[in-house]
């Protein structure tokens, strides 16, 4: 039996449709991935906060209250702030509240309550809350992770839109030297706009349309 093979390859329309389908599938996946990264970052922060709180608790239980300043200062340099308060006393025991939080994070502080021998400490509240830039280290907060991932998603959307629009330009104007020059100019302009902090798809689309002299079709107006 003779098998017929189509050697023409894919048409431009088929390529554009494939890119569009890829974009539709990829964007939700990027959202799922970003949420996973954010959750992982928050989990690491909470684990670190719990470790710091437990370290402080062990020192209080051992009566090493004089070490609190040193411990809190150490972790402050790593980007974490700690708060210790002696709340109630029952005989020789006192209840202590220990709070630890990541500087620059909007997540609630980790709180630990312990019962330990009563000491002279009444409270230990940091005098000032340093900025994240002056914290001297520590992992990025979940807010930073969100921002980076969102920027990545926006750039991905812009890239997908640009490829589709350039396809429209080629179909509309045909492939020639003028079209090639316009495509290179559009690509260079979009890259420069992104470098300058312009990530509005409407602004980028409007500029690309002006350079190409081609209207953005309704199905590419993603704004």
Image: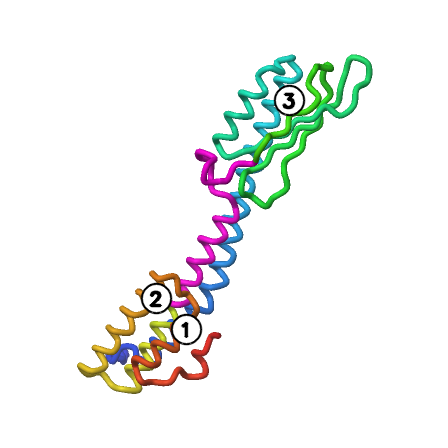
Label drawn at residue 57 = 3
Label drawn at residue 193 = 2
Count residues near mark 3 (Cα–Cα under 10 Å), then give few for <14, some for 14-19, many for 20+: many
Q: How is the image coloured?
A: rainbow
Label drawn at residue 9 = none
Identify the element where label 1 is drawn: helix
Q: Is residue 171 left or right of residue 37?
A: left
The residue sitting at 75% across, 25% down in the picture is 87
Count residues near mark 1 (Cα–Cα under 10 Å), then give few for <14, some for 14-19, many for 20+: some
Q: CA distance from mark 1 to mark 2?
A: 9 Å
Q: CA distance from mark 3 to mark 2?
A: 52 Å
Q: Is residue 142 left or right of residue 62?
A: left
Query: Who is closer to the viewer here, 122 or 18?
Result: 122
Chain-order first, disc 3 or disc 1: 3
Label 1: which residue?
203
Q: Is residue 48 left or right of residue 149?
A: right
The residue sitting at 17% across, 81% down in the picture is 177
Residue 138: x %, y % from top left: 47, 35
Q: Is residue 153 magenta?
A: yes
Q: Is residue 104 magenta?
A: no
Q: Which residues are magenta?
A: 129-158
Query: Who is closer to the viewer here, 172 or 87?
Result: 87
Q: Quadrant of residue 117?
A: top right
- Please report contact status of discs 1 and 2: CB closer than 8 Å, yes or no: yes
Q: Is residue 102 left or right of residue 170?
A: right
Image height check: is 22 above or below 33? below
Identify the element where label 3 is drawn: helix
Residue 223: x %, y % from top left: 48, 74
Residue 212: x %, y % from top left: 30, 81
Identify the element where label 2 is drawn: helix
């Amino acid at each position: 039996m003779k098998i017929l093979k189509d050697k023409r390859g894919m048409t431009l329309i088929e390529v554009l449709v494939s890119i569009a389908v890829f974009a539709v599938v990829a964007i939700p996946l990027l959202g799922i991935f970003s949420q996973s990264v954010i959750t992982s970052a928050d989990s690491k922060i909470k684990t670190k906060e719990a470790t710091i709180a437990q370290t402080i608790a062990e020192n209080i239980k051992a009566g090493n209250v004089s070490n609190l300043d040193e411990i809190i200062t150490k972790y402050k340099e790593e980007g974490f702030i700690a708060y210790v308060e002696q709340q109630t006393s029952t005989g020789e025991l006192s209840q202590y509240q220990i709070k630890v939080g990541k500087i620059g994070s909007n997540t609630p502080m980790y709180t630990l309550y312990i019962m330990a021998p009563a000491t002279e400490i009444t409270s230990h509240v940091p005098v000032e809350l340093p900025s994240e830039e002056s914290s001297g280290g520590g992992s990025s907060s979940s807010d930073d992770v969100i921002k980076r991932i969102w920027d990545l998603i926006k750039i991905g959307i812009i890239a997908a839109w640009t490829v589709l629009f350039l396809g429209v330009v080629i179909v509309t104007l045909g492939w020639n030297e003028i079209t090639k020059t316009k495509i290179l100019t559009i690509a260079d302009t979009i890259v420069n706009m992104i470098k300058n902090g312009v990530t509005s798809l409407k602004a980028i689309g409007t500029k690309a349309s002006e350079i190409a002299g081609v209207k953005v079709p309704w199905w590419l107006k993603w704004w």
